[in-house]
Image (spheres, helix red, strand yellow):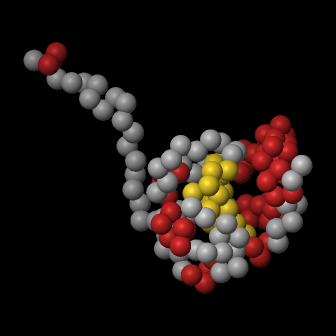
Amino acid sequence: METQFPFNLFEHNDIIQVSDNQKISANICQGKRILALVLPYHDIQEVSQQLFKIFSACNIAPEQVLVSNQLMDWGQIEQQEDLKEVFLFGIKPVSIGIHYNLFPYRFLGLGEKKVLLADPIDLILSQGQLKADFWHKTLKPYFIGA
């Protein structure tokens, strides 16, 4: 009897936890160009300051950056006209409703938005080579050129 039971039935399937993603109010994204989603356990104040420094080097004012450690639904993100770039720092695309394969550290155009999948921001900042590659191979060519 045991040999007939399919033990490996779910062996290759992933279980995806579906949560109620945060609703985006129109005024919270007004004037924001970049949405940076970070892991829920990150201290939002500390991470925000680091990201503001990074994007300031890209000639993006801190007022144009929205940092959140709450997941948001991709359908709602798409509706925000001011948002142009979405950075997923350690966030799985499927957890916000993106069902495309994203290559790490490369922008993918989805409609009017550009989406970038990256390692968690604390990992990027703690590893010198990863930080340099993120700047020289991703941010600098996209935002500054060269």
Where is residue 135? Give x, y as percent.
Answer: 83, 48
Quarter of the figure with residue 19: bottom left
Where is residue 21? Give x, y as percent.
Answer: 46, 65
As drawn, 33 above or below 104? below
Tally of numbered discs: 0
- The answer to whether residue 12 shows anywhere in this view is yes
Q: Nearer the viewer, residue 141 or 30?
A: 141
Q: Is residue 57 left or right of residue 112?
A: right
Residue at x 46%, y 57% (from the top left corner): 97
- The answer to whether residue 69 shows anywhere in this view is no
Q: Is residue 130 left or right of residue 38?
A: right
Quarter of the figure with residue 8: top left
As drawn, 76 above or below 116? below
Residue at x 85%, y 45% (from the top left corner): 136
As drawn, 80 above or below 125? below
Q: Quadrant for the N terminus, please.
A: top left
Furthest toward the bottom, the residue is 27
Residue at x 55%, y 68% (from the top left corner): 77
Q: Nearer the viewer, residue 101 or 68?
A: 101
Furthest toward the left, the residue is 1
Furthest toward the front, the residue is 111
As drawn, 100 above or below 113? above
Where is residue 46? Give x, y as percent.
Answer: 75, 63
Quarter of the figure with residue 31: bottom right
Where is residue 45? Give x, y as percent.
Answer: 72, 67
Residue at x 85%, y 61% (from the top left corner): 58
Q: Nearer the viewer, residue 118 or 140?
A: 140
